[in-house]
Image (spheres, rainbow, N blue to C red):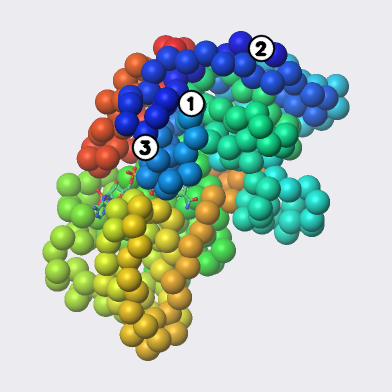
Amino acid sequence: MAQARGYAATDASKPLQPFTFERREPNDDDIVIDIKFSGICHSDIHQVRNEWGNSSYPMVPGHEIAGIVTAVGAKVTKFKVGDRAGVGCFVNSCTQCATRDLDIEHYMPGLIPTYNGFEADGTTPTYGGYSDSIVVKEGYALSIPENLALDAAAPLLCAGITLYSPLVHWKAGPGKKVAIVGMGGLGHMGVKLAHAMGADVTVLSQSLSKKEDGLKLGADHYYATSDAETFKTLAGTFDLILCTVSAEIDWNAYLGLLKVDGSLVLLGIPENAVPVHAFSLVPGRKSLSGSMIGSIKETQEMLDFCGKHNIVSEIELIRMDQVNEAYERVIKSDVRYRFVIDMATL
Ligand code: NAP
Ligand code: ZN
């Protein structure tokens, strides 16, 4: 067992604070990563504050992990000491069924989240990336392309794959009109990725305050959803709408912006339910769907795609002791566009 240092939440109402804990002994198929950078995802905040009702404490959040490999087990083939490696939202999954071949292992029971879960033994808690090191099976670690800055690449491990996967699944590309709702951590990655795939990209943000940035990152159009005219002007426009909003909004209004056969895909996970009227779906054969991160294979594909197109996150690098303040700013949508913790400041 190796001693690790990090920051943890001890219950839903307290700020994160310094925490020491033990990382498991590496097995033959494990690698050890010296964590250099860790992104702050809104899901960290939901879980720290028990907004999904499934939190266990102490909790070391963080599932946008980028670092350098410091040790490899005897059977490791994919990584060597000194390599850049990333870890996303899960560190193990069911190996009993054929889901790894279908690249849907992240939708199967038995998924072991990077934190707020338990290792395969069912008793050892998993601890995430707001820490100095992690031990992970090589099959659940990702290679980060050499041309991408490690700090700005960290958010690709969750925000990047969460947008890449539905864009690929719903075939975003030339001739497709894609809207991204919410210009936050997830949303700004969606703009960059959809643009690189060749789609016509529209941002639907609460206001026009981030319009200049949105257009710079690759959006073709930018509208404020606080303006009721937006919903009239854009009615029946989109093939695909990806909703990254973490609050309850009226999905019926957004369904009205879809073309016939269009899909509204929920990525954001608000605390409470939102009613959807059948009339929002039935006339127009529209779909309301959800999507969650992506498989390990697809996550590597996304990283390689980002390497090829030079895509990283727009980040604000912070010290570890600024994490609680950063959470407050994320909640106020005051982030341009992802906070990343420099783990050297731990
Ligand atoms: P974020 O950086 O806070 O971005 C969310 C954006 O939603 C904000 O920037 C804001 O954009 C918009 N927004 C916030 N409050 C709103 C409101 N009341 N009404 C309308 N729009 C509002 O968060 P994130 O890290 O991107 O995560 C977003 C959500 O996705 C969270 O619920 C998170 O848990 C979830 N998530 C899901 C997955 C998955 O696999 N499906 C993966 C990661 C995260 P504007 O200022 O532009 O309006
Ligand atoms: Zn996340």
Q: Which label is found at residue 49? A: 3
Mark 3 falls on what kind of element?
A: loop
Calculate the distance from the C-alpha at mark 1 to the C-alpha at mark 3. Answer: 12 Å
Query: Quick one: label 2, few (<14), some, or many (20+) residues within 10 Å?
Result: few
Calculate the distance from the C-alpha at mark 1 to the C-alpha at mark 2. Answer: 18 Å
Q: Examine the image and state in which quarter residue 272 appears.
A: bottom left
User: Which residue: 32% across, 20% down?
Assistant: 322
Calculate the distance from the C-alpha at mark 2 to the C-alpha at mark 3. Answer: 28 Å
Q: Is residue 11 above or below residue 21?
A: below
Are dots 1 and 3 in contact, CB under 8 Å? no
Type of amino acid at the residue the image marks with label 3: Arg
Residue 287 screen position, x and y as percent? 45, 75
User: Which residue: 56% across, 27% down?
Assistant: 127
Q: Nearer the viewer, residue 315 or 176?
A: 315
Of pointers 1 and 3, the one earlier in the residue sequence: 3
Q: Examine the image and state in which quarter residue 234 appears.
A: bottom left
Q: Can residue 337 be seen at all in this image of the molecule?
A: yes
Q: On the image, numbered disc 1 is attached to which residue?
A: 58
Q: On the image, numbered disc 2 is attached to which residue?
A: 2
**Left or right side of 240 for 75:** right
